[in-house]
Each structure stands twice: as structure tokens, then as C-alpha cells.
Image (cartoon, rainbow, N blue to C red):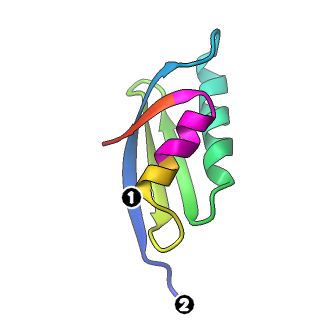
Amino acid sequence: RRLKTRHGEYGVGDAQRSRHDLSELASTVQSALKNLDGVASSDVNLKAKTVLVRFDSAGVTPDAIAQAVTDSGFDATVK
């Protein structure tokens, strides 16, 4: 069975926690997304402050993805 995947871009804002360096931001966000059912991959663009997420829309919603990023300590919005 082939997954129907979608791509979503999420803006990642300022850290809610203090003193995050850029590499920690990338690994923290990717770890949070890896734990979500339905997320196939994520690509953090530190310069643009975005995360491009490939996901199965039957398994996870864009809002749940944004919430996972927010729960990991960073503001996130669906773009």
C-alpha cells in the first residue's frame, strides 16, 4: 500500500526556553517529529527558521505537527 503523503512547512520562531543553539534546535525539533505517527521525514532549515515535513495525512494533522514542535520548546505555525 502506498502512503498518500503531504508536505507542510512550519515556521519555527524564537525559543521558549533560553540558550538554544541552532544545532540543538534542529535535533530537538526532528526528535519531536520523529515520534509522531504518520511523519515520514522532516528537514529543518535553520537560516529560514522553517521545518519542511513530509507526512501521511491519514496519520497526523498539520496542527498536531505544529503542536509537537511547540511542545518541544519552540513556537511553531503552519505556513
> What residue span does the magenta drawing correspond to?
66-74
Question: Residue 20 is drawn in which quadrant?
Answer: top right
Residue at 37%, 46% (x, y): give it: 9
Query: Which of the marked residues, 2 or 1, is nearer the chain's N terminus?
Result: 2
Label 1: which secondary element:
strand
Q: Is residue 73 magenta?
A: yes
Residue 16: image location, x then y, percent: 56, 19
Which label is found at residue 7? 1
Q: Amino acid at mark 2?
A: Arg
Quadrant placement of the C terminus: top left
Q: Amino acid at mark 1?
A: His
Residue shown at 38%/27% (left/top)? Answer: 48
Decide: is 17 above or below 63.
above
Q: Nearer the viewer, residue 54 or 62?
A: 62
- Which residue is painted at 47% across and 44% down in the image? 66
**View extreme (left): residue:** 79
**Residue found at the very far top of the displayed protein:** 19
Instruction: Kindly identify which residue carries mark 2.
Output: 1
Identify the residue at image location x=56%, y=60%: 39
Residue 52 percent location from the top left of the image:
43, 47
Q: Residues within 10 Å of mark 1 (few under 14, many from 20)?
A: some
Residue 38: percent from left, percent from top: 57, 66
Q: Is residue 1 left or right of residue 6?
A: right
Q: CA distance from mark 2 to mark 1?
A: 19 Å
Q: Quadrant of residue 28?
A: top right
